Every structure is written in C-alpha cells, then in structure tokens.
Amino acid sequence: MPTPPGMLKGKKVDRGITNVRHTESSWWRRWLGVEHRCLVPLTAFAEPEHLPEGGSRQVWFARADGEPPAFFAGLWCRWTSVRKLADGETTDDLYGFLTTEANQEVGAVHPKAMPVILTRQEDMDLWMTAPADEAMRLQRPLADGALVRIAPPEGAS
C-alpha cells in the first residue's frame, strides 16, 4: 500500500507499506471499503526475531490445526508513484494486510504485532462484504494456541 506522506519525509522513492495497523487514520480509511478489500492466501508466514547478539532471523508459523490455507485480511489499491528510481513514475496495483496485537505464539518472537488471519468462512465473507466498521472488528489476533512454529519452508531464507 502507499506509504503515508509523513513517513516519506523527502524520500524520492515510495516502496510502499505491507502492514496496515492504524485503520482509524484518515490515510487508511479511504481504502477500507469493500472495493479495496482482498484475501491473501497463506499456508505459513514469518516474523522477524531480533537476536540478542544483533541481527535477526525469520521464524515461521502455520496453523496448529493443520487445516487448509488461511487468509490475511488484505487491502489493495491502484497507485501512481515512484517505486524505483530507474523506472520513474509508474501505476501499480499494491496490496497490504491488516495487523493487530500479537497472540502468545507470535508475541514470543515479535511482540509488536501480527497479521490479521482469517480461518473461518464466515469471517472471510464478513471481510469481503460488510460495512467498514463491522469488518474492522476482525482486526484481532488469532486465539492463543492457534499457531505453531514450523521449520522454514524449502527455499525460504
């Protein structure tokens, strides 16, 4: 999603933002309507774990119940900006997904936040069709115990 202007502070390139947390902000409110919502499928996801000796590593999570894919509650828009200096101004379809406070499993690694993950069909339907204020009630963490740490998928860094 497009970066809020205050975060760009004179930068010539807007690489965009993947995580959308503060949905009460006027910057994000314009994209909360059903026409800008999407579902981003996942079988696993990673969060950075900051290591005591410095640096970080990716820790991977998946559903504890082993069920089929879940979905991030996503937002998308068409946006014109300079994403790469070499390309100049381009118009692109951008997406990001909602984040919320972390549950127990993710919070042990990344206490700041986790993605909003939808696992029930009724929640996916609500996300895709409900008025914004109703849909935003889904901006909550999965229940503690709903995720497990897994080995990195093949080819993941």
Image (cartoon, rainbow, N blue to C red):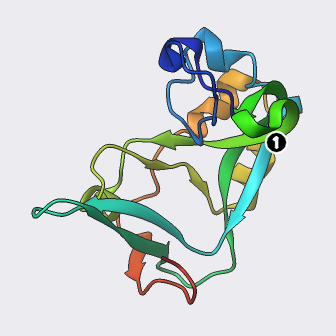
Q: Percent x, y for residue 95?
A: 73, 42
Is 16 in front, or is 138?
16
Viewer-proximal residue among 45 and 117: 45
Q: Is residue 109 left or right of residue 99?
A: left
Q: Nearer the viewer, residue 7 or 75?
A: 7
Residue that appears at 58% across and 18% down: 4
Residue 8 placement (x, y as % from top left): 53, 19
Image x and y of residue 68, in percent: 69, 79
**Residue 87 lies in what quarter of the image?**
top right
Q: Secondary structure at mark 1?
A: helix
Q: Which residue is denoted by mark 1 in the rendering?
A: 128
Residue reaching furthest left?
53
Q: Is residue 149 left or right of residue 3?
A: left
* Quadrant location, the N terminus: top right
In the image, residue 118 sits, relative to residue 9, either above or below, namely below
What residue do we see at 61% from left, 25% from top?
A: 3
Judging depth in this view, the residue of 136 and 18 nearest the camera is 18
Image point (54%, 38%), residue name: 139
- Residue at 56 percent across and 73 percent down: it is 44
Q: As drawn, is 143 to the left or to the right of 54?
A: right
Residue type of the residue flagged with mark 1: Met
Label 1 neighbour load within 10 Å: few <14, some 14-19, many 20+: many
Q: Visible in this render: residue 157?
A: yes
